[in-house]
Structures are given as C-alpha cells and as structure tokens.
Amino acid sequence: MEVKAQPKKKVVEAMAVIVVLTAFFALFSRSAEAGLLKAKIYMTQEKIPRKLSEKELIDFVKKHQTQRIDESKESKVKDRSWQANVLIAFNSPLGALEFDLVFYDIQKGVRVLVDRQNTLLSERAQKTYLQKINLKRPRYQPNRKMELAIEVNRAEVGRFKFTTAGE
C-alpha cells in the first residue's frame, strides 16, 4: 500500500515545483508591468574616460550630470544637433533584451511625443547601460523643455527632464 502512495506523492511534489517556478518566471519577466523595475537616468555632455568600473562610471556621470544639453556648433543651423551620454541604472536586471528611450516635448505642460529609440541589449543580467544620443534638427528644436522616458515592455520605468539649449 505504501508503494502506491509514494509515486503519487512525488507527482504532486513535482507539480508543485512546476507551479512555483512558472509563477516565479512569470513575475520576473513582467517586473516592469508590475512596477518592480525602476530606472535612474543621468545625462552628461562630458567626455567619459575609458576603462571605468561600473561604480566609477556611475560616479563620474553623477558628478558631471546636466539637465541642459548644448547644441553643436556647425556653421549651418540645419546641421546642428544635441549630443550627450545617457546612463540608465536599473534597480534589477531587465529580464528582457531591449528597452526604449522615448523623447517628449513638455514645453507647453503636456507630453508631445517627439521620438522613440529602441535599444537592443547583449546581456539580460546587466543593470547599467551607457547610451550615446544624437538629437538632430528639425525633429528636435532649441530651447525646449524635454522629457526622456525609459520603457521596458511598453511600461515606463523612469523619467528625466532636460532642456535643449541653442540658437
């Protein structure tokens, strides 16, 4: 009688493990939608030294952070742009292989979509990303209040306000 009860117990235990693992992976992969994933965003126009550790990189960008990015100095106004480095520090690994940088013009107090840039990743486990941005005219305009939002799986996980300075 005990021999028959033993296999049944193992099947129930195996099913319980499968249910727990499925719930864990569903929760992990949907962390952005659940509000668990957050991103801190830093922007700088300073040249970033090579060969910094992750902590040194974050410290450098925090120290040189700006909320105003200056326009490039090309002689033709139509050829000018705003270039910066954006550091995105997530509180946990993404669990995804991409995220979006979404740019809004907030000059008039409401968000107006200007651009969406998709970023593909090489590692799911990485938490810190350095992204170079080049915001070109005529899509971007000088002296505008802007907002950069980071989206993972279409869920917003961070925001950063900045200004485009220029002529």
Image (tube, rainbow, N blue to C red):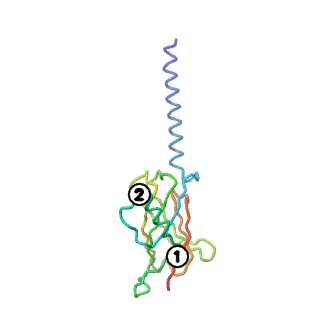
Which residue type does callout 1 highlight? Arg
Placement of 80 over or under 104, stated as above or below: below
In the image, residue 80 lies at what x, y percent? 43, 82
Residue at 54 percent across and 45 percent down: it is 27
Neighbourhood count class around disc 1 (C-alpha, 10 Å): few under 14, some 14–19, many 20 upward? some
Q: CA distance from mark 1 to mark 2?
A: 27 Å
| The furthest residue to the bottom | 75
In the image, residue 155 lies at what x, y percent? 55, 58
Q: Is residue 35 left or right of residue 139?
A: right
In the image, residue 160 lies at what x, y percent? 55, 67
Q: Which residue is mark 2?
A: 121
Q: Is residue 25 left or right of residue 111?
A: left
**Residue 37 numbered mark, or none:** none
Residue at 59 percent across and 74 percent down: it is 106
Which residue type does callout 2 highlight? Leu
Q: Which residue is mark 1?
A: 68
Placement of 86 over or under 69, stated as above or below: above
Residue at 45 percent across and 65 percent down: it is 60
- SS label for mark 2: loop
**Disc 1 versus disc 2: nearer the observer:** 1
| The furthest residue to the left | 51
Q: Is residue 97 left or right of residue 113?
A: left
Determine which quarter of the picture holds residue 109. Answer: bottom right
Mark 1 and mark 2 lie on one chain; the one further toward the N terminus is: 1
